[in-house]
Amino acid sequence: MKKNFLFLIAILIFAVGWPVTVKSSSFRIYDVKQGREISLSQALADLEEKRIILVGEYHTEKNHHLAQLRVIQMLHESSVHLAIGLEMFRKDSQDGLDRWISGELSEKDFQAVYYDNWNYSWPFYSMIFKYARDHGIKMVGLNIPRKLTRQVASHGFGSLNEKQKGTLSNITCRVDKEYMEYIRSAFGAHAHGDLNFTYFCEAQLVWDTVMAINALEYLNSDPDAVMVILAGSGHVRKPAIPQQIKKRSNLTYAVLLPEIPGRIDPNTVSDKETDYIIFAPVK
């Protein structure tokens, strides 16, 4: 039933269409540290100084993807040398991304690559991918095969062999209080059968760590680049991917989370979790 519902939503969105250009005035942004609302354009000066900008999402929320697109547009229009890091794509699918950006793949052919990597409907993300292609912006796959994170969630990090671990080592469920609360909340939403919380926590950290490592690897290869990382809001929070980045480099970063009333809003998050909250456009 849920799949049919999401499919229907995707069809309706595709039929109506989403804009490729989004006005910055469409969005409001809350500066968490200063405790005040500013425009997205006002935040640009800060974002331009960062090497990594993480913008969160709920995967099926239209406004979250429009906000991500606007951040990308704003930075590109400011002549920032930009790359887009993707939770949605595995690192081993980089060739498909490169061929899409170079124009070698049609939209129809690229969708086969997309669906090999991600389960959510193409129309949710198409305007971001098309904008990147139309403007020659590098897109970088940051993820690993889901079968590895599923294995860790079921049997723990210790169940991986050396080849599977790759650049990973000593993943343990050791996080700060705020992130532990988030992981427990996520565990409660996903738990079924005999799922072990410690293994679930390790799987979350594997995901965060791999994306951080792959983002840093790309930025080390392109020292002038600024990377916008698009990922689920749980991975974007400061104790998640940003913490793994901080452990491995001195690169500056900023975090933008989309508003989820009662869960992500000025009353429920602090600057320990995000720098900014993006509000949905006023209808």
Image (tube, rainbow, N blue to C red):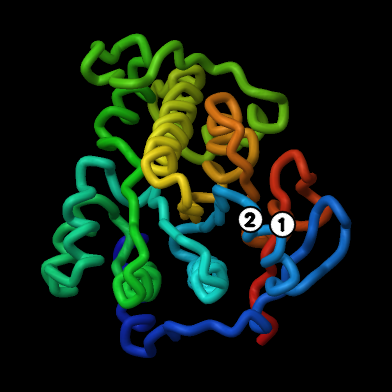
134 and 199: which is toward the camera: 134
Residue 249 in picture, x, y percent from top left: 55, 30
Q: Residue at x 56, y 72 (%)?
A: 78
Residue 153 in picture, x, y percent from top left: 38, 25
Q: Give the answer, above or below, for where 277 lies relative to 171.
A: below
Residue corresponding to mark 2: 257
Q: Using the rendered image of the protein, determine whether residue 88 is visible from the camera's viewpoint.
A: yes
Residue farthest to the front, as pictured: 224
Residue 14 in picture, x, y percent from top left: 32, 82
Q: Residue at x 47, y 54 (%)?
A: 230
Q: Residue at x 83, y 53 (%)?
A: 267
Residue corresponding to mark 1: 276
Three-letter amino acid code of the residue under disc 1: Tyr
Discs 1, 2 touching: Cβ within 8 Å: yes
Q: Residue at x 14, y 61 (%)?
A: 112
The kind of secondary structure element at disc 1 is strand
The kind of secondary structure element at disc 2 is strand
Q: On the image, which quarter does residue 157 sit in?
A: top left
196 and 279: which is toward the camera: 279
Quadrant assignment for the C terminus: bottom right
